[in-house]
């Protein structure tokens, strides 16, 4: 199954892209998405346990992803 | 009606205030966040704000709803700007109205603190020396090449 992954700010710069699609095994969790992204060129700049969102709401690494989900890896926020 | 938005154009504070004003509300608190000319000892020229837009708007609306729950009777209007801002520009504006001043002030404080803690917005500071960096409020600016 495929999921859409969004990267932002310093994480997008590190990996050189702001969006990608990953093919994952059924039953995968968001933490698996992070592990895969950290294997990409530049991905080592991401921390092992970054903030995560599933379909535009914060989620834990143990949350199971489903086909078509949107996973976001969130750098430290700096609004205001 | 309470509401939160991301905007690209300059924030109209007067219009935002009008959204929450009412004959039964004797207090309106306004908070404005503006671009400061220095950070950590470095002279700042401007800031690029970017956001995970769908989630930022959802999270800001969740925060507004929480403020209304915590301070019954408060009306909240919240706008955060994205794009390139110069020193002195308003990056965020919050208007909270209530019959009385304490809930109006306390709700405003709640909204800005929660916004800074959890809304997915990022800023890249541009310095007068020509360099720029992503800001990491949890520590030092994030280290990014280029």
Image (spheres, coloured by chain):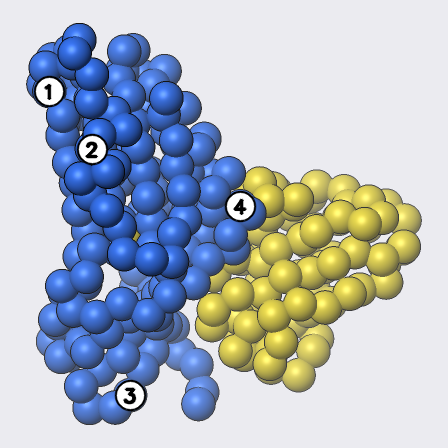
In this view, the mark in front (3 or 1): 1
Of the residues under marks 2 and 4, which one precedes in the sequence? Answer: 2
Chain under callout 3: B
| Front residue of this view, candidates A17 and A50 | A17
Tell me the residue that label 3 is attached to. Answer: B131
Chain under callout 4: B
Tell me the residue that label 2 is attached to. Answer: B17
Tell me the residue that label 1 is attached to. Answer: B27
Of the residues under marks 2 and 1, which one precedes in the sequence? Answer: 2
Chain under callout 2: B
Q: Secondary structure at mark 4?
A: helix
Q: Is residue A12 left or right of residue B122?
A: right
Residue neighbourhood size for the residue with mark 2, other residues' Cα within 10 Å, grouped as few (<14), some (14–19), many (≥20):
many
- Cα distance between the residues tagged 4 and 3: 29 Å
* Residue B42 seen in the figure: yes
Q: Residue at x 21, y 70 (%)?
A: B86
- Cα distance between the residues tagged 2 and 4: 25 Å
Tell me the residue that label 4 is attached to. Answer: B55
* Residue B138 seen in the figure: no
Of the residues under marks 3 and 1, which one precedes in the sequence? Answer: 1
Q: Secondary structure at mark 3?
A: loop
């Amino acid at each position: 199954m495929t999921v859409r992954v969004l990267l932002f700010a310093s994480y997008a710069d590190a990996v050189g892209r702001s969006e990608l699609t990953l093919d994952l095994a059924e039953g995968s969790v968001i933490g698996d998405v992070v592990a895969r992204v950290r294997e990409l060129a530049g991905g080592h700049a991401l921390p092992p346990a970054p903030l995560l969102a599933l379909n535009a709401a914060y989620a834990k690494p143990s949350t199971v992803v489903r086909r078509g989900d949107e996973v976001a890896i969130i750098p430290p926020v700096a609004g205001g | 009606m309470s509401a939160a938005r991301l905007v690209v154009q300059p924030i109209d504070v007067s219009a935002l205030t009008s959204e929450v004003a009412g004959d039964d509300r004797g207090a309106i608190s306004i908070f404005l966040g503006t671009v400061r000319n220095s950070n950590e000892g470095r002279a700042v020229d401007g800031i690029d704000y970017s956001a995970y837009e769908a989630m930022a708007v959802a999270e800001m609306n969740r925060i507004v709803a929480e403020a209304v729950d915590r301070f019954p009777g408060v009306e909240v209007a919240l706008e955060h700007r994205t794009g390139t801002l110069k020193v002195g520009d308003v990056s965020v504006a919050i208007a909270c109205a209530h019959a009385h001043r304490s809930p109006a002030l306390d709700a405003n404080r709640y909204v800005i603190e929660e916004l800074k803690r959890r809304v997915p917005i990022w800023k890249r500071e541009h310095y007068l020396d020509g360099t720029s960096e992503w800001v990491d409020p949890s520590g030092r600016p994030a280290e990014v090449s280029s």
